[in-house]
Amino acid sequence: MKFFLDTASLDEIRNAAAFGIADGVTTNPSLIAKEGNVDFKEHIAAICKIVCGPVSAECTSEDAEGMISQGHDYAKIAPNVVIKCPLTREGLKATNKLSSEGIKVNVTLCFSAAQAILAAKAGASFISPFLGRLDDIGENGLLLLQDIIEVYRPYDWKTEVLAASIRNPIHAIEAARMGADIAIHGGRPPRDVSLHFHTDPSEARYIIDVHGPTPLHGITTRVGYDVRTCSAAVMAASQASGTSVLSEVRALYRGHQKAIERFRSIGVDIALAKIKSFSRSGT
Ligand code: E4P
């Protein structure tokens, strides 16, 4: 399964590329707007310099003629640009025309298997069912994804199924299990999904096994911004060192007080704690 990034942030794209999870990019007008006052075409060109795979540039016209004209314009930006058209009647007309000219189209805003069939018939290279937005209204986006994959299977349509509007790792795991061609992600999975409650404690134990049990002067948890992960690392280190006194704990926590209370509750006294606040906003 390929991973396409759902972001227009050049930093996020570079970061994900370093993890090998930037097979393509699917921007949309809202994501481009978040980047501030950037020139649309220059920004898409900058993304295409980082990522060799398909980069979606979304049309903002509402009629087929306008979308076709924007499609022609955007397709000149770079050879890997894909034109994103909405799954409206006008969007399908534009998809049919652009794909007949050899321009790849990602048909977006798909909410039913019937729509997905029409997109495939129009020649879409990608169909983007929006999982999260269906979940948001109490429906099941994964069922739609399953439907589309099953409906497409007997045919030789060249349309790749792109699981879009993904909200959580379960969406991505289930999309992989079902055999979706592509899953979208928002640029942060390397930090969020790679975390596991057991990883830091296990690493701390290995470090202590190698460097000796006592005295223990410092632990650095590199990814422990979750207080539960950090405290588990400290507890493991404390047990392995045979002391409940750690002279220095350096870690990243969401809140000082919460971290200190948690350490006390597991019997660890912190003589010197260098605790750096950390939140998703980076403060
Ligand atoms: C896909 O092409 C869209 O840009 C995206 O997945 C929309 O996701 P959202 O529902 O989180 O806005």
Image (cartoon, helix red, strand yellow):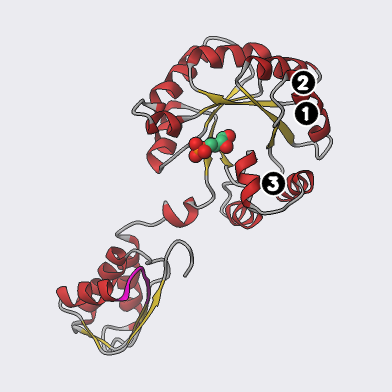
Whether residue 283 can be seen here? yes
Q: Is the residue under label 1 in contact with that under label 2 (CB below 8 Å)?
A: yes
Given the image, on which type of amino acid does mark 1 rest? Gly
In primary-sequence order, the first of circles 1 and 3 is 3
Gap in angstroms between the C-alphas marked 2 and 1: 7 Å
Given the image, on which type of amino acid does mark 3 rest? Val
Q: Which residue was labeled with disc 2? A: 98
- Horizontal arrangement in the rendering, residue 199 relative to residue 35 (left or right): left
Judged from the image, the secondary structure of the residue bearing numbered disc 1 is: helix
Give residue 36's quadrant in the image.
Answer: bottom right
Residue 171 in picture, x, y percent from top left: 41, 36
Give residue 59's quadrant in the image.
Answer: top right
In primary-sequence order, the first of circles 2 and 1 is 1
| Residue at 59% from the left image edge and 54% from the top image edge | 12
- Horizontal arrangement in the rendering, residue 169 relative to residue 10 (left or right): left
Return the residue nearer the eye: 97 or 53: 97
Given the image, on which type of amino acid does mark 2 rest? Leu
The stretch in magenta equals 251-256
Return the residue nearer the eye: 76 or 85: 85
- Say above or below: 39 vs 56: below
Mark 1 or 3, which is nearer the eye?
Answer: 1
Residue 51 in picture, x, y percent from top left: 69, 46
